[in-house]
Structures are given as structure tokens and as C-alpha cells.
Amino acid sequence: MKTLRLVIGNKNYSSWSMCPWLLLKMFDIEFEEIQIALYQDNTAEKLGPYSPSLKVPVLLHKDITVWDSLSICEYISEELLNRGGWPSHPKRRASARSVSAEIHSGFPILKADWPMNCKASYTLTPSEKLSEEIARIDAIWACCRRRFGENGNYLYGRFSIADCLFAPVAVSFNAYGAELSEEAHIYMQTLLDNPFVQKWITLGRREKEALSVVHGSYG
């Protein structure tokens, strides 16, 4: 048994599971993946031995348990990447942490109306409130790329935890046909072209479980 295990939910729907999974893959950290189907009659029973919150994702490292996607990414950065999960420059790191916390805790309309679904492919007209949230994410992407992205294709140049947190959003924006500025669209496509994001989407599309509850799949 590997000393590092990551418990995740359905790849098709579980956006927060995607975030630490992507971080581990991008930094080539070996881990055991434990997948538990969500919203089934026995889901809580299966999650019980792993997750204090009975939710995913959960990271198990030796005798340490970490849950919540952002906390897991922070732990991976500190303990396994010598804090390399964030940009090294203080100004960039502060910005990256801020936008990551913002998408993690906010955007309730997006999470309710446009939950991640790797199999979805159609254009939806967003409500006024959702349009406001999409515009805010567009501004984050465009602004971060202009200010900090000169040395690479990601928000802060090289890949970071911030990109992990926004990868599920890119999947949703692409699935539901979000209208974005040119700069934000380029960044969205960068995430979608990432080989590990592509692998996650491919595996998600192969899943057969159909969930009756998918709202709020970012949390």
C-alpha cells in the first residue's frame, strides 16, 4: 500500500476531487487513487473509514488525514513540494491564494446552475446572476494572465494550485458554452489542453453512474 492515498468521487461530476488529483499528477507524485461513487445508498458507509466529513476528496499520508480540496493542495505544497505548489514571488503567491480561496468559497450560482459534467456539451443562456459570476471569473483569468503570466501559459506563468482550482470551471464553461473574453478563452483552452485534464475528462465520460444530485459539485 502506498503511503499517499487520495480518495475521490466520480470523475464526471466531482469537481473538487479533480483539484488535488491534478496537482499530484502535474508534479509527478506517486499516489494510490481510491474512487467512491457519490450519492449512492452505501456512499457514506464507504467513505466512513477515510473521511471525517463523509465527503471527498480526502488525502491520507502515513498517519495524517486531510480533507477539503484547498487544504489538501496546501498540504501537498508544504509537505511534498517544498511549498512549490504556489508561485515563489510573494505578490504572485498572495494573488494566487486569494483567487483560489475566492473560487473555493464563492460563486454559488455557478456551482448550482452549471455543475461540472464531463459529458455535457450544449449552450445554455446564463441568468443575470450567473452572468455576473462568469464575468468575475473572466476578469480574474484575464487580469492574472496580463499581470503575472508572462513566463508561461497558466495564470501565474508556471502551473500552480490556482490552476487546479480553476480547471473544473474550465470544464463547465466549455460544456455549457460560456461567452468569454479572448484572453480568458485562451486560458480556458490552456487548461482543457492539459494532458491530465484531458485524461480526467476522458475517464469521466466513461463512467456510467447517473447522479440525481449534482448541484454544487464544486464543493
Image (cartoon, helix red, strand yellow):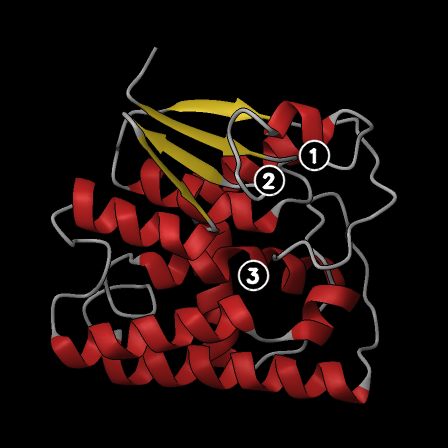
Q: Earlier in the sequence, mark 1 or mark 3?
A: 3
Residue 205's mark? 1
Left or right for 145, reference 127: left
Question: Split into 4 quadrants, where in the image is the N terminus?
Answer: top left
Q: CA distance from mark 2 to mark 3?
A: 11 Å
Left or right for 187, reference 82: right
Are circles 1 and 3 on residues that touch, CB within 8 Å? no
Q: Quadrant of residue 2?
A: top left
Q: Amino acid at mark 2?
A: Ile
Percent position of residue 146, x then y: 31, 84
Q: Amino acid at mark 1?
A: Arg
Nearer-the-camera pick, 2 or 197: 2
Q: Which residue is mark 3?
A: 170
Nearer-the-camera pick, 177 or 59: 59
Q: Secondary structure at mark 1?
A: helix
Left or right for 135, reference 127: left
Q: Quadrant of residue 218?
A: bottom right
Are circles 2 and 1 on residues that touch, CB within 8 Å? yes
Q: Residue at x 30, y 54 (%)?
A: 74
